[in-house]
């Protein structure tokens, strides 16, 4: 089981692999593939719960899905992605909600969509033994403020703000940093500047690691962000299997004799 210390020590050496999972069987597959980190992302909102954004995801849902993932995983580091408004309003409530992920759901760390309001919280959580992964650039929980899932850090001021916040969160004790939908040259610079590893999504090739949403990576999503690539056609595989099942039931080829059992004594009765 890689600890946050081992993940931290990979900065600048070995590439870090990270993918989301939201349920036990998927998490087992991702773990067996040798993923370093499994993120129980609030992307579950659109990926599995049918919402249009991540905003409706609750602490209870995050806890339940994190616990399911943790029951299946042997090796990967498990990070619970704290949902919208579960942190940042109030220090005590934030610590309580983050603590639940370690105490009740067996997560190893939490991830917070970061900003000026999460510097003190990151420090406090780290002091208490709750490792924090920071997240800068496109932070989808701010979609209403941003007006869309747009590229971030594209002006000199916006880029500088990301650099300053990255440093501040490293100093506050974050063990790693997600950089989402930012220019590759900015991500490369932040990666150089920090001691902790950066993990990119739409942030170019020079981060210390990469993360994607499971459904996007395996080809199960209806849409994918422009920065995602699909490495399989799981949707096509499921469609094929479902077509075959419907056809087998409709034509009577399933169930066959080997799927059925009869009881001779009942033959006399019926
Ligand atoms: N399945 C899934 N994959 C993800 O990567 C993901 C989620 N869900 N949910 C939470 C966020 C949302 N993400 C997104 C969603 C859309 C774009 C996107 O289409 N961006 C375009 C259009 C931006 C606009 O003008 O609205 C772009 O060109 O940047 C990017 C990231 C990333 N995250
Ligand atoms: C894409 C990653 C970084 C994320 O926050 C999520 O899956 O919710
Ligand atoms: Mg998220």
Image (tube, rainbow, N blue to C red):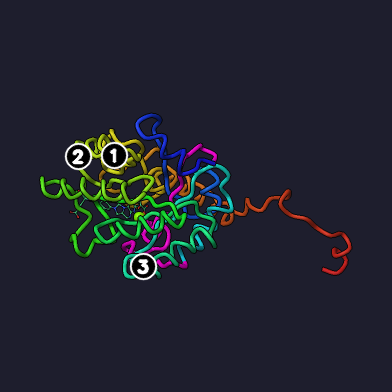
Q: Main secondary structure of the magenta part?
A: loop
The reply to whether the C-beta atoms of the residues labelled 3 and 1 are less than 8 Å apart is no
- Which x, y percent locates residue 102? 51, 58
Which numbered dot is residue 91?
3
Label 2 belongs to which residue? 186
Pick whichever of labels 2 and 3 is earlier in the sequence.
Answer: 3
Label 1 belongs to which residue? 194
Foreground residue among 73 and 191: 191
- Which x, y percent locates residue 103? 53, 61
Could you classify mark 2 by the number of other residues whose Cα lies within 10 Å: few (under 14), some (14-19), or many (20 or more)? many
Classify mark 1: helix, strand or loop. Answer: loop
Q: Is residue 50 magenta?
A: yes
- Which x, y percent locates residue 101? 48, 60
Mark 3 → mark 1, Cα distance in angstroms: 26 Å
Classify mark 2: helix, strand or loop. Answer: helix
Going by the image, does 249 lie left or right of 21?
Answer: right
Q: Would you say residue 232 is visible in this rendering?
A: no
Classify mark 3: helix, strand or loop. Answer: helix
Pick whichever of labels 1 and 2 is earlier in the sequence.
Answer: 2
At a point 25% along the width and 57% down the height, the residue shown is 115
Q: Is residue 93 magenta?
A: no
The reply to whether the C-beta atoms of the residues labelled 2 and 3 are less than 8 Å apart is no
Foreground residue among 217 and 84: 84
Q: Magenta segment, which residues?
A: 32-60
Q: Quadrant of ligand 3?
A: bottom left
Foreground residue among 79 and 204: 79
Toward the top, the furthest residue is 13
Foreground residue among 243 and 213: 213
């Amino acid at each position: 089981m890689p600890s946050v210390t081992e993940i931290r020590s990979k900065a600048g050496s070995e590439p870090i692999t990270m993918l989301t999972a939201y349920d036990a069987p998927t998490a087992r597959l991702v773990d067996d593939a040798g993923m370093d980190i499994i993120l129980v992302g609030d992307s579950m909102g659109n990926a599995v719960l049918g919402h249009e954004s991540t905003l409706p995801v609750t602490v209870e849902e995050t806890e339940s899905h994190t616990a399911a993932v943790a029951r299946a995983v042997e090796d990967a580091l498990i990070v619970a992605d704290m949902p919208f408004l579960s942190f940042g309003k109030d220090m005590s409530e934030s610590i309580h909600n983050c603590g639940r992920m370690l105490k009740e759901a067996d997560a190893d760390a939490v991830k917070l969509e970061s900003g000026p309001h999460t510097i003190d919280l990151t420090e406090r959580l780290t002091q208490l033994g709750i490792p924090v992964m920071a997240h800068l650039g496109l932070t989808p929980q701010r979609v209403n403020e941003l007006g869309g899932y747009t590229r971030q850090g594209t002006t000199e001021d916006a880029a500088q703000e990301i650099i300053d916040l990255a440093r501040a969160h490293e100093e506050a004790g974050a063990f790693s940093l997600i950089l989402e939908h930012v220019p590759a040259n900015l991500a490369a610079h932040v990666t150089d500047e920090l001691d902790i590893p950066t993990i990119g999504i739409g942030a170019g090739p020079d981060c210390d690691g990469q993360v994607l949403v499971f459904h996007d990576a395996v080809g199960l999503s209806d849409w994918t962000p422009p920065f995602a690539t699909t490495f399989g056609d799981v949707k096509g595989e499921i469609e094929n299997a479902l077509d075959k099942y419907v056809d087998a039931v409709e034509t009577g080829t399933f169930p066959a004799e080997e799927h059925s059992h009869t009881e001779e004594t009942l033959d006399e009765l019926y």
